[in-house]
Image (cartoon, coloured by chain):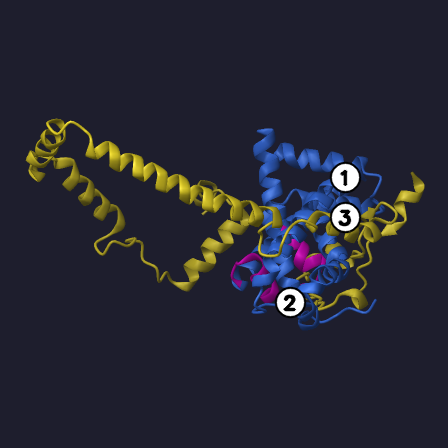
Chain colours: A yellow, B blue
């Protein structure tokens, strides 16, 4: 197992492309232990891991096209699309024929019944619209103010980052 | 192999016949940095490898639409950051366990890992880092270990610089406290 430990991750400053090292003596002023610690990476990887990994990735992307569409999917949809169009046309034709030859007495009766219902008899329609407007705000958009003060932005982002429990925070305050 | 600039890499990638080659270069160029971050987040090597693979798969599928508004490095880092958080979230959801149980599990993984070469104080530091909430652990790792600028961290996390600064400040205080307490206990 000993040979597995030798492949230390190399993160020397010289190898940090596009990465600007920013030491923080002021930020660690009150943290003597953190300030004094070596920032070397103690994690190691199995021998040859970084030599093999690019090949593993090449194998994984072999059948994928950039943009998230696999070649097989494109081919499949090319075959599938004409079939689905043909199927839709066939179903439409059948429905049309069925409608033409349907006994004439039932068709108009249903139609009359449906048209006989007045809008007032459907209170749920109005109610739903009202509820919808209430939920969305007067203009159909969210009524939550979008221009929150910057400080609040910072506070929310901070709380989110901290995973803080708001109840706990209130108690502390 | 000398590192290529973002523009050079993208130029190679945009030619149909050299996409795979460009992607191979990109993986070679960024695999170590991304792995180091992911490993600090998920601790276990095998899990880190899975997350790293998912990161590069997402990069492969999204690279065509990459417009260069940000650095390639911070774009890749953002994918890795999101993949880590998703992985840790799934881990908690999948096991139906609390945050404490996950921390315990990560600690056990670290203690039993044959791929950890740090000394005792580094192990204590890592234990303390694992006690931080996931998002704050990411902030601490980027700033303390990687020395990343707050502006870049903001691009990566989608959080404001002010919030990141205060989160890091709190994280430093917590870790310093935990490591100190741990040392006092063991002496």
Dot 2: few (<14), some (14–19), or many (≥20) neighbours within 10 Å?
A: few
Q: CA distance from mark 3 to mark 2?
A: 22 Å
Determine which residue is flagged by label 1.
Answer: B110
Q: Secondary structure at mark 3?
A: helix
Q: Nearer the viewer, residue A99 or A164?
A: A99
Whether labels 3 and 2 share one chain: no
Residue A167 in the image: above or below residue B82: above
Q: Is residue B180 visible?
A: no
Where the N terminus of chain B falls, by quadrant?
A: bottom right
Viewer-nearest of discs 2 and 1: 2
Q: Is residue A122 above or below residue B180?
A: above
Which numbered mark, 3 or 2, is in the foreground of this view? Answer: 2
Q: CA distance from mark 1 to mark 3?
A: 25 Å
- Looking at the rendered structure, whether the residues under marks 1 and 3 are on a common chain is answered as no
The reply to whether the C-beta atoms of the residues labelled 2 and 1 are less than 8 Å apart is: no
Q: Position of residue B115 (x, y in %)?
A: 83, 43
Report the residue at 43% width, 61% height from top: A151
Q: Main secondary structure of the magenta part?
A: helix
Magenta extent: B138-160
Question: Residue B162, percent across and down?
Answer: 52, 63
- Left or right placement of residue B11 versus residue A132 in this view: right
Q: Which residue is mark 2?
A: B14
Q: Is residue A114 visible?
A: yes
Nearer-the-camera pick, A67 or A50: A67
Which mark, by number, is residue A56? Answer: 3
Q: Disc 2 to disc 1, how far (Cα)?
A: 41 Å
Q: Is residue B37 magenta?
A: no
Please report the residue visible at 35 percent of the width from the left and 42 percent of the height from the top. Answer: A89
Q: Quadrant of the C terminus of chain B?
A: top right
């Amino acid at each position: 197992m000993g040979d597995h430990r030798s492949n230390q991750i190399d993160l020397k400053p010289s190898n940090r492309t596009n990465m600007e090292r920013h030491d923080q003596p002021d930020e660690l002023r009150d943290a003597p232990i953190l300030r004094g610690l070596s920032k070397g990476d103690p994690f190691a990887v199995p021998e040859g891991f970084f030599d093999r990994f690019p090949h593993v990735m090449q194998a994984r992307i072999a059948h994928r096209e950039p943009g998230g569409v696999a070649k097989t999917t494109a081919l499949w949809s090319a075959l599938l699309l004409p079939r689905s169009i043909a199927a839709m046309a066939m179903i439409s034709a059948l429905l049309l024929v069925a409608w033409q030859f349907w006994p004439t007495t039932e068709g108009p009766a249903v139609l009359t019944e449906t048209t006989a219902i007045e809008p007032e008899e459907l209170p749920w329609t109005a109610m739903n619209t009202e509820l919808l407007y209430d939920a969305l705000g007067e203009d159909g958009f969210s009524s939550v103010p979008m221009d929150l003060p910057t400080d609040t932005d910072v506070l929310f982002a901070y709380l989110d980052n901290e995973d803080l429990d708001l109840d706990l925070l209130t108690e502390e305050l | 192999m000398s590192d290529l600039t973002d523009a050079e890499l993208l130029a190679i990638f945009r030619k149909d016949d050299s996409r795979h080659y460009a992607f191979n270069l990109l993986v070679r160029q960024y695999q170590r940095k991304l792995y180091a971050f992911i490993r600090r987040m998920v601790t276990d090597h095998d899990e880190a490898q899975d997350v790293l693979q998912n990161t590069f798969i997402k990069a492969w599928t999204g690279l065509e639409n990459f417009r260069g508004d940000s650095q390639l490095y911070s774009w890749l880092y953002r994918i890795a950051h999101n993949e880590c958080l998703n992985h840790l979230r799934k881990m908690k959801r999948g096991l139906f366990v609390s945050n404490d149980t996950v921390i315990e599990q990560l600690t056990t993984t670290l203690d039993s890992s044959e791929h950890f070469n740090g000394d005792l104080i580094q192990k204590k530091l890592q234990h303390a880092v694992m006690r931080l909430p996931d998002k704050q652990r990411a902030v601490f790792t980027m700033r303390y270990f990687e020395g990343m600028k707050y502006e870049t961290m903001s691009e990566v996390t989608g959080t404001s610089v002010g919030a990141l600064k205060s989160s890091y400040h709190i994280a430093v205080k917590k870790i310093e406290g935990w490591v100190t307490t741990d040392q006092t206990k063991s002496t």
